[in-house]
Image (tube, grey):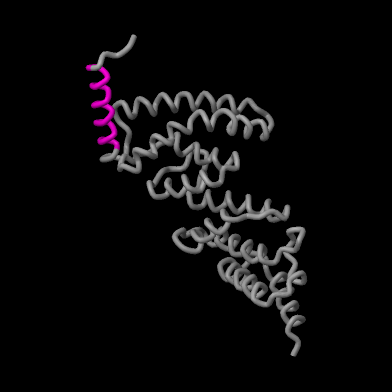
Amino acid sequence: MALSPGMRHKQQVLAQLGAAQAATTGQATGLVANSLHLQLIALEQDMARLKTLARMSDKVAMKRDELFPKYRPYVDKYLELAALGTVYQNALFQRLIVWAFDIGDLETAINWALLAIEQNQRTPGNIKRDWAHFTADTVLGWAEEQAALGHGVEPWFSRVFDKVRGDWRLNEQATAKWYKLAGCLLLRDKDGVPRPSALADNATLEQADHWLALAEKTHSKIGVGTLRHKIAMRLRALNPE
């Protein structure tokens, strides 16, 4: 049955009041909470469907082709409200950040992760790290895979690396891994393998050694000694006395 103009106005007013309350308390209330509650019920059912799939590729395909497009409009609507000051713990938003990484949509995933950090959003219950560590670990793993294949890793590597070196206070081992990969990326040969002997540019070799030295300083067991020794040998070969 269609709502009368009066009922539609009442629902609009209640929704506005719920949004205002959410902005004040950081918790969804009223129609805002009811809407989120229904979304989360559907999400729980869909996550149960995901668990029935044995193959990781099938899980990713379902997230990419069905579930992410299904729930993204709700997240986009929340982010519109958040931009106006209505910020609250949104479990749907939190879950879709993870899914954005899973389906390889790094632009959306990183943008949303940065917003989640600004909003002090919790990570989903199955993730025991904060958003900074989760994002750093996930993008690092992706970058390592791409580099090994000889593929490019920009702009995503540099975007997160800037955060690792600046705003984010990651633990020492996580930070050192980023410094190490930054150095290794500069040393890649045509096959994606870090090989100082393939380079003939002093500045690039020195910059790579700079990152590797920071990795070693940050976490002494990061394992860059051999690579740094090869850089030193290459620099001596390029600059004979």
Depth check: give the residue in front, 139 or 125.
139
Q: Tell me what residue is drawn at x 59 percent, y 67 percent.
A: 215
Q: Tell me what residue is drawn at x 52 percent, y 57 percent.
A: 159
| Range of magenta residues | 6-22
Q: Quadrant of residue 235?
A: bottom right
From the top left corner, tell me how far across and down residue 138 is, in percent: 58, 49
Q: Quadrant of residue 195?
A: bottom right
What is the residue that sits farthest to the top in this orientation? 1
Residue 223 shown left or right of residue 116 in the figure: right
Q: Is residue 85 magenta?
A: no
From the top left corner, tell me how far across and down residue 187 is, in percent: 70, 66
The N terminus sits in image quarter: top left
Q: Main secondary structure of the magenta part?
A: helix
From the top left corner, tell me how far across and down residue 4 is, in percent: 26, 13
Q: Is residue 15 above or below residue 167?
A: above
Q: Is residue 157 above or below residue 198?
A: above
The C terminus sits in image quarter: bottom right
From the top left corner, tell me how far across and down residue 96 is, in percent: 50, 37
Q: Tell me what residue is drawn at x 51 percent, y 61 percent.
A: 162
What is the residue that sits farthest to the bottom in this orientation? 241
Q: Is residue 11 magenta?
A: yes
Residue 146 shown left or right of residue 215 in the figure: right
Q: Quadrant of residue 92?
A: top left
Q: Tell me what residue is drawn at x 58 percent, y 24 percent.
A: 49
Residue 19 shown left or right of residue 222 in the figure: left
